[in-house]
């Protein structure tokens, strides 16, 4: 079974990001102790919405996200603080439309490279690209994106690795959709956009 991923865009209220950081630290720490958790990346939007968060959470099985993670005392405590401080822009609570979630199987690619000395860097930049294939043609789309993974891996060698993650994600609910998750080393002067959609 492929690893299961949730890609989240969380729209925060004005000025909420400093408090979001306080909430995310213990959530990241507890995720490392959960038996189904494989990865937990969260960061700040740098493409014009500074109070919006982006996260990629990985699990060995969907049960880790839907049952395991929200069952922890840490999760319940931190989510109560989120609601009490009104950190979401429009509606508070786990059912809020301010939580924009996509659910994926890992199709191909990597989140870290064993030869990357900075694979666990906390100041990386991320771009997410959504793709929609014509009806019935997602297999071809996934093949094209997977070929790009191979080209990226072949183009860089340690210690000069700039692409830290390049993952092809297959959406579970939308059978025509796939996404690229790319994490990179970038300077303040070469920021890349956090989000872009290529729609039908």
Image (spheres, rainbow, N blue to C red):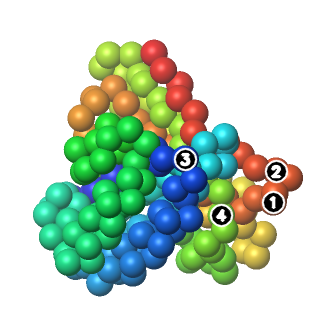
| CA separation in Å, label 3 and label 2 | 26 Å
Q: Is residue 84 left or right of residue 95?
A: right
Task: Between residue 36 and residue 163, name the one nearer to us.
Answer: 36
Q: In this view, does 134 lie to the left or right of 115?
A: left
Residue for point 81% across, 60% down: 187
Residue for point 32% across, 80% down: 30
| CA separation in Å, label 1 and label 3 | 26 Å
Labels 4 and 1: the sequence-earlier one: 4
Q: In this view, does 46 lie above or below 65?
A: above
Labels 3 and 4: the sequence-earlier one: 3
Residue for point 19% across, 75% down: 72
Callout 1 environment at 10 Å: few (<14), some (14 to 19), or many (20+)? few
Q: Name the residue under label 4.
A: 124
Q: Mark 1 points at which residue?
A: 187
- For the question of whether residue 53 can be seen, the reply is yes
| CA separation in Å, label 4 and label 1 | 9 Å
Labels 3 and 2: the sequence-earlier one: 3
Residue for point 23% across, 61% down: 65
Marking on residue 190: 2
Where residue 11 appears, x then y in whole percent? 46, 44
- For the question of whether residue 109 can be seen, the reply is no
Q: Which of marks 3 and 2 is in front?
A: 3
């Amino acid at each position: 079974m492929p690893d299961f991923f949730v890609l989240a865009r969380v729209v925060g209220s004005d000025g909420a990001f400093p408090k979001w950081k306080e909430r995310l630290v213990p959530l990241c720490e507890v995720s490392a102790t959960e038996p189904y958790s494989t990865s937990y990346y969260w960061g700040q939007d740098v493409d014009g919405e500074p109070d919006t968060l982006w996260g990629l959470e990985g699990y060995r099985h969907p049960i880790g996200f839907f049952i395991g993670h929200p069952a922890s005392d840490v999760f319940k405590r931190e989510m109560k603080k989120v609601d009490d401080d009104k950190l979401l822009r429009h509606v508070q609570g786990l059912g809020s439309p301010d939580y924009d979630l996509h659910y994926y199987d890992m199709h191909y690619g990597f989140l870290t490279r064993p030869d990357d000395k900075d694979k666990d860097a906390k100041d990386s930049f991320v771009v997410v690209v959504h793709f929609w294939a014509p009806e019935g043609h997602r297999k071809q789309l996934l093949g094209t994106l997977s070929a790009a993974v191979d080209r990226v891996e072949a183009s860089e060698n340690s210690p000069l690795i700039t692409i830290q993650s390049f993952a092809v994600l297959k959406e579970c609910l939308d059978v025509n959709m796939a996404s690229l998750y790319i994490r990179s080393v970038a300077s303040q002067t070469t920021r890349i956009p956090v989000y872009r959609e290529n729609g039908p």
